[in-house]
Amino acid sequence: MRTLLPSLAVGAALALAACADSAPTGPIAGAPDLARREVATPGTGPWAKVVRGETGPGSMYQIFVPTSWNGDVIYFMHGLIPPTRPVALPTGTDWDSFVAVREQFGALGYAIAYSTYSENGLALKDAALRTHQLRGLVASAAQGQPDRSFIVAYSLGTAPALRLIEQFPKQYDGALLACGMVGGTPLELQYAGHVRALFDFYYPGVLPGDAVDVPEGGEMTPALQAAIVSAVLANPTGMLAIASTVQTPIAFVPPSNPLDWGNPASVGYQTAIGTMLQSLVTALGYQLYTWDVVDRTHGHSPFDNSTTTYTLGTPAIPTLAGPLSAAIAASNVGVKRYTSTPDAQNFLERYYVPTGELEIPVITVHNRWDYLVPFFHEAAFAEIVADAGSSSMLLQRTLNLYGHCSNAGFAPAVVQSFLDLAAWVDSGVKPAN
């Protein structure tokens, strides 16, 4: 199988995505100190005023009030920031490049408010707390109560966003959830755990620790990326088997011409294998933060494959269905098994598995080939919402793009979907997909 990946260019494809992060159980107590804030008047851009301050120990907020304010506010909830990084407000391309989208919303007349969380990592409870606290601060900064309040959330930030709108539906008018972990925290962590467990079976000893016991403070490094690439190049069957397993459908862009599968020199083949490898590295990089999750579950395993039977889904390369099926069958014999505990699962379900009880309009936007938060979250969320009888409040949009909260067409789709959400709230008429 060594010949499956000749001359694969992988250097630039190995960008590890930082993406991310659920919510109070009652009214928020302890309003932030309004005296501890800074007010600035920008010289450029659409903003008349920018207010900056603290919402709690270690957290910071910013509120942007546009020159031509339309009376509405958008509360933005960012995704996962690696737990090894300091808490900081976004600049440039931080927070999945939301800054550029923020400026577009400001030009359209929307006020913007967001907060860091008190800590990075899987700080889902704190994410909802800090965001909900902004409501009183916005009224003070804008010198008036907003007409409408929207939530826009990216990636893991969609989990606490869902908890807020499900718990406080009278305080928010609509939500846009982009590249989101909308199927729930356990679903995402199970995916990452399965990828790691299978990778360790096919490529033993490449990564430190295992699917649960990851060295504290660990994260993806250039050396680990290089080790993964080297291992895959030496034995592509393992990566192809992972991509073909039902439990681990790592994203890749398939060739538009199926005949390219038989031509490893073709652009279609190289793109498919290159995106598959990037998705594998990204999923493993996310899994290396498992030490942060284990800290939050009191040392108990958040991952369980004790009764999992790994099965062949759609073969990554159709002509290799037989060898890939055999490789997956072998994994069921040799893969390391892990067992979670009820308290760990209860924690993950509380922070957060959505109830699906939507009382306000919600639009989701998701790249079909998302390498960090897999597209299967959308089907899981649709089923949860349907079971709750709330499908009339949900519109899901799919972008035929590769990447997580990114790609050239992602930001325009977010802006347009938000405008459609606002029109839906105005008219009560669900927009077309």
Image (cartoon, grey):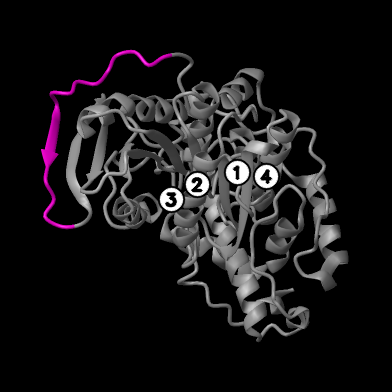
- The answer to whether residue 73 of the structure is visible from this angle is yes
Residue 429, disc: 1
| Tag in front: 3 or 4 | 3
Report the residue at 58% width, 78% height from top: 8
Q: In the rendered structure, which disc, 3 or 1, sits on the residue that comes first in sequence?
A: 3
Give the residue type at disc 3.
Answer: Ala
> Which residue, given by chain and number where applicable, does mark 2 sit on?
423
Tag 1: Cα neighbours inside 10 Å, few (<14), some, or many (≥20)?
few
Left or right position of 262 against 165 = right
Q: Which residues are magenta?
A: 27-44
| Tag in front: 3 or 1 | 1
Q: State yes or no: residue 30 in magenta.
A: yes
Per the model, the C-alpha gap separating discs 4 and 2 is 41 Å
Per the model, the C-alpha gap separating discs 3 and 2 is 32 Å
Report the residue at 12% width, 37% height from top: 39
Residue contact between numbered discs 1 and 2, judged by CB atoms under 8 Å? yes
- The answer to whether residue 208 of the structure is visible from this angle is no
Give the residue type at disc 1.
Answer: Val
Residue 414 location, x and y as percent?
47, 54
